[in-house]
Image (tube, rainbow, N blue to C red):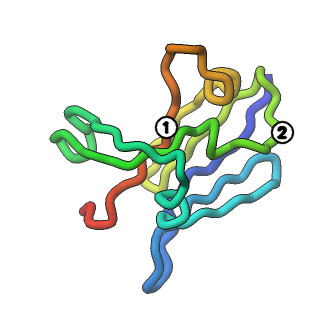
Amino acid sequence: MGFVLAAFAAKFAFASEPVLTIDIAGKVRSLTRGQLLGDSATAPIDVLRDTAYGRTMHYRALPLDRLLAGLDLPRDQILEAVAMDGFIDMLPVDLVLHPPPGGARAYLAIEPADAP
């Protein structure tokens, strides 16, 4: 089984907002926080006991299947998510792009602009 790389990384440039960069098999897509939050599919989510903040956090989140729509990803591949802080996670493409009815759905939580 091969791996598909998705680099979920917030890049900071002087006087600009963070950018999410998705790189899958050389096809690169970059979206700002504003673009992500402007997507009509964003939804509010609460994360109880968020490990990064040690308390309940409220986020706007975008379903990963929506974010990755239009990319040619084989169902048997793995997405590797890499954050700027070094956190890495692996997600099965089939579950991300084809969530079961009534089952769990993967989301990208968008950190608030006022987060420390």
Other residues around mark 2 within 10 Å, as few (<14) / some (14–19) / many (≥20): few
| Place of residue 107 in the rendered image (x, y in percent of width and height, measured from the top left) | 49, 37
Quarter of the figure with the C terminus: bottom left
Residue 2 placement: quadrant: top right
Q: Amino acid at mark 1?
A: Tyr
Depth order, front residue of 61/19: 61
Depth order, front residue of 87/35: 35
In the image, what residue occupies the spot 51% across and 60% down? Answer: 38
Other residues around mark 1 within 10 Å, as few (<14) / some (14–19) / many (≥20): some
Left/right of residue 86 with respect to residue 81 in the rendered view: left
Instruction: Give the spatial CA distance, label 1 vs label 2.
Output: 19 Å
Residue 98 placement: quadrant: top right
| For residue 102, above or below residue 83 | above
Most distant residue in the bottom direction: 15
Identify the disc placed on residue 83: none
In the image, what residue occupies the spot 47% across and 80% down? Answer: 16
Left/right of residue 5 with respect to residue 56 in the rendered view: right
| For residue 114, above or below residue 93 | below
Residue 20 placement: quadrant: bottom right
Q: Amino acid at mark 2?
A: Asp
Quarter of the figure with the N terminus: top right
Residue labelled with disc 1: 107
| Place of residue 18 in the rendered image (x, y in percent of width and height, measured from the top left) | 47, 68
Depth order, front residue of 73/44: 44
Residue labelled with disc 2: 72
Total residue callouts: 2
Describe the element under mark 1 as helix, strand or loop: strand
| Place of residue 82 in the rendered image (x, y in percent of width and height, measured from the top left) | 55, 46
| Place of residue 25 in the rendered image (x, y in percent of width and height, measured from the top left) | 81, 47
Check contact, mark 1 vs mark 2: CB within 8 A: no
